[in-house]
Amino acid sequence: MSHDVESDDYRGSLDVESGVEALRRSPAFRGPVDPPDGRGDGPANDHLASIHDSAEEQFAAVAPFVRQGLERGERCLYIADDNSREEVLAALRDRGVDVDAALDSGALSVHTPAETYRRTGEFDRDAMVEFWEDTLARATDDEGYAGVRAAAEMTWALDGGPDADVLTDYEATLNSVFAGEEYTVLCQYNRERFPAEVVRDVIRTHPHVASDGAIHHNSFYRPPEEYFGPDDPARDVERMMDSMRERTEMKATEQERHRYLRRQYEIAADTDRTFGQKLQALFELGCERFDLELGGLARIDPETDLFEVEAVSGDHDYLVPGARVALSETYCRVLTDDADVTGVTDPADDGFASLEAYEEFGVRTYLGTRIELSDDLDRSLFFVSSEPRDEEFTDAERTFHQLLGQWVKYELETDRHKARLESKNDRLESFASMLAHELRNPVTIGEIYSRQLPADENPEAVEYVADAFDRIEAMIDVMLVLTKGREAVDGCVPVDLAEAAREAWAEVDAPDATLDVDLDRTIQADETYVRHLFRNLFENAVEHGSTSRRPQADDAVEHGSTSPRSQAREDAVEHGMTDRSDDGVAVTVGELPSGFYVGDDGPGVPPEDRDVVFEAGYTTASDNGGTGLGLAFVAELADVYGWEVSLTEGASGGARFEFRNVERNQ
């Protein structure tokens, strides 16, 4: 019977990584977990000590430890003493371990010290070593498990157990037993219950220590040959010196890593530099970081065997912008995807000595990555040197190079997106200009002929025709502002905002609504566009503010109305309808310290919709002919003039559009 690994993350990994190395990748632990440096002749092994002072801290380490063993297809044992079997299973279950399935399959079992450490009646070191060897043989040879993983509560040793020296001698002996075998064992010590001298010796006999949510490489670990061997002060002094040097080097390396990352961020975030300037700065930074001579970017295409240099950081006889060479003649031929960083430090030994890049270009060291692009040829970001490099590139160097590649990819894709967007905008502006020109010609002709219609025979029909032409002209203006922005606004003249508001109101078909203007501000603007702005805001208020909206002009025929908008307003005045009725909305245009506002007393706009109402195409009145362009025009015109526009709620409810930074006419 075999027990397959459950998680793809660990499938096939048992031959190349130990249990502790796998734990390095577990998000349950803070890290990194550095492998021990193999002091003495014995190999490193997966013998861990959990030093904890609470059940919470204890199971925070045990749960991911057991869960990972199950995922790796290992036979998992738990030896309980300080906690009962039920408490252990509950703690594992609460932390995401599928306890029931593991118990049913036999992959997990819980034992007592009487079944393990004291199975012969009292603790016997040799008997316990035999227990571990038999357990591994049975699990791997007979039951098909990938290995044995055990978590043991060691508090049994406090209850008439062995002397402290016997216990720690046993722990030291296990390092030889576990070496090179498929064991991963976590010995759990509660520091609140064990004497400090015992905990100290436990730490000395375990290559790794789990504590406070992290797994630590134990620099105080003593391999069996040292632990059982004679005292060697010279060796201890050398170890202390090595430990201090290692700590200093690690700190210096970490500081250097942060320094380069900070400089990379500063370059990438510099808004005053162009992409090319940033790229050159990052080339120089990479050359400094990797101690190489030249950085470059090239277009590559494996299908056509293309390698074309786009940019380089310095002078080179062959690697110059525009230079082409067969991709198969470069080190970049080995690049597979944008997640891969390839380093070549011994090209002759790696089979590159016959390449043109080696023979003619003189490249002896290479570090590169492939940048995959969706709508363009891929790129290769590379750093090279004519001098060989004695050491392989470190993981930190490869990671830094990968970050550089990710930034280049983002910038290239962003530039391509901007270029496509600009091209679309140019085509849209050209189309809008052509359409405006083509529409205005027949509209102008239509207006000329409409003035020759006999108004005395059907005055309402004549006025409808004139209103329709005016509406088309207004829509042309709106379209031009939305597509061309500032280019659509030719000249500015003094515009009295109060007068423009009243003129716009006269064009709105709203006999049941009222307008109150309390504004004294003259600005420099295009009078037609300002009037369109007010009209769009007024129509929006009437459309959404009335409790029973009156049909618009294009709905009038359907509902039997034959009066044009101006006639409808005259009818309203004649019948005393200047005050708001139960069906109308009250619209107010008022003064702000640096601008003006347009408000109504309708139902208002929900807070979550106040930003999207300015987007082109957004409308809640599509069934009534709404295009979703009116408020988009308002926002675009405000931007053209440098105004700040916002939508809020008025003092008495309703929608209130506020315009600030509106300069007065000087």
Image (tube, rainbow, N blue to C red):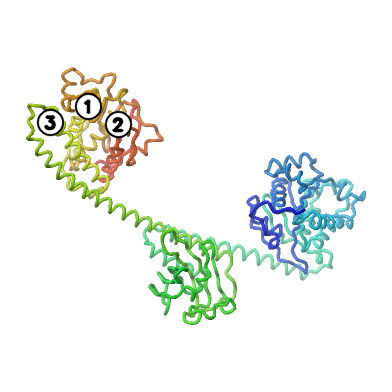
Type of the residue with mark 1:
Val
The secondary structure type at the circle numbered 2 is: helix
The image position of residue 7, as x and y in percent, is 66, 52
Type of the residue with mark 2:
Asn
Q: Mark 3 points at which residue?
A: 462
Which mark is first along the chain, 3 or 2? 3
Q: Name the residue under label 1.
A: 557
Disc 3 crowd rating (10 Å Cα; few below 14, some 14-19, many 20+) is: some
Verify CB contact (< 8 Å) between mark 1 and mark 3. no
Cα distance, mark 2 to mark 3?
A: 24 Å
- Nearer mark to the viewer, of 2 and 1: 1
Can residue 190 be seen at all in this image of the molecule?
A: no
The image position of residue 319, as x and y in percent, is 43, 75
Q: Look at 55% across and 70% down and name the residue there.
A: 343
Type of the residue with mark 3:
Val
The secondary structure type at the circle numbered 3 is: helix
The secondary structure type at the circle numbered 1 is: loop
Q: Look at 29% across and 39% down and name the residue there.
A: 629
650 lies left or right of 67: left
Verify CB contact (< 8 Å) between mark 2 and mark 1. no
Q: Quadrant of residue 553?
A: top left
Can residue 347 be seen at all in this image of the molecule?
A: yes
The number of numbered discs placed on residues in the rendered structure image is: 3
The image position of residue 172, as x and y in percent, is 82, 60
Mark seen at residue 186: none
Which mark is first along the chain, 3 or 1? 3
Residue furthest top as drawn:
575
Q: Name the residue under label 2.
A: 624
Q: Please, is residue 111 above or below residue 627 in the view?
A: below
